[in-house]
Image: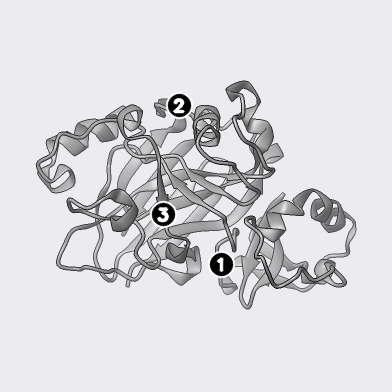
Amino acid sequence: MKICRFDDDRLGLVEGDEVFDMSATLDGVALIKPWPMPQEDWLIANLARLRDELRRAPKGKKHRSADVKFLSPIANPGKIIGAPVNYMSHLAEANADKEISVGVTVKTIDHYGLFLKANSSLVGASEGIALGLTSRRNDHEGELVAVIGREGRNIPEADALEYVAGYCTGLDMTVRGVEERSLRKSLDSYTVLGPWLTTADEVGDPSDLMIHLEVNGEVRQHCSTSHLIFGVKKLIAYASGFYSLKPGDVIMTGTPAGVGPVVTGDRISLAIDKLGTMQVAVR
């Protein structure tokens, strides 16, 4: 099942090139208390029940996918978790390019651990990227994104995929510099998720999905997730050893070689096997 948020916060089902408005299935859902705000995404926390409703409910108004505005499929993640230097190919290119390494020897995720991105950086594919700090190099980083489906702490690696609600494509945009990653990657619109969430049952094993990224038709990144240093299972187990994972938490799994600068007017196309293609404008 492919679930999206679109236009003015409508809930949609994606089938081929069409989006069906399924917002009516949310009618009558009890309102939550205004505080404390939950540390999870409401849609993902209720996904199991909603999926049954979506299967039974009659399809609503039909739209061409080209005519809708895709928002981030996750509206309110409690955490956006990043995995730095999680491909050996990216390690090699970072140490070979001083504009990436800024003169510092780059190491792998084994050394850095994880980092967090500001939730205010989150946008959907149709919202695009608003470049900031344009006096510096701003790079695209295409990534597989895993969305946590239920709460867990100290999750065994062997059980980790049972905690995944689904997957989507993601852009971890980056300003090059000496500051901590969590700062340089947290500018407004520097976390792009979409175009929709594909539920875990449609993806199966995420350990060999092809990531393909183009900028203005030029291939920049093309690599399989089989080359991840920490695969999805290990990332979930590792992250859950430091903090509780909640429904809707986002894990960006890292980017392979081929990262590069983008400028105003560029158009990024990011495709991942089984997840679809995300088209993102840079402004």
Identify which residue is drawn at 58% across, 24% down. 157
Return the mark for residue 117. 3
Q: Residues within 10 Å of mark 2 (few under 14, many from 20)?
A: some
Tell which tag, 3 or 2, sits nearer the viewer: 3
Judge from the rendering whether residue 182 lies leftward or rightward of residue 12; answer left or right.
Answer: left
Q: In the image shown, does 98 or 243 lie closer to the viewer?
A: 243
Return the mark for residue 226. 2
Image quadrant where residue 199 sits: top right
Q: Earlier in the sequence, mark 3 or mark 2?
A: 3
Return the mark for residue 71. 1
Disc 3 marks a residue whose amino acid type is: Lys
Image: 253 above or below 283 = above
Image quadrant where residue 109 sits: top left
Disc 2 marks a residue whose amino acid type is: Ser
Q: Please, what secondary structure does the residue beneath circle 1 have?
A: loop
Image quadrant where residue 85 sits: top left
Tell which tag, 1 or 3, sits nearer the viewer: 3
Q: CA distance from mark 1 to mark 2?
A: 29 Å
Residue 189 in view, yes or no: yes
Identify which residue is drawn at 38% across, 68% down. 188
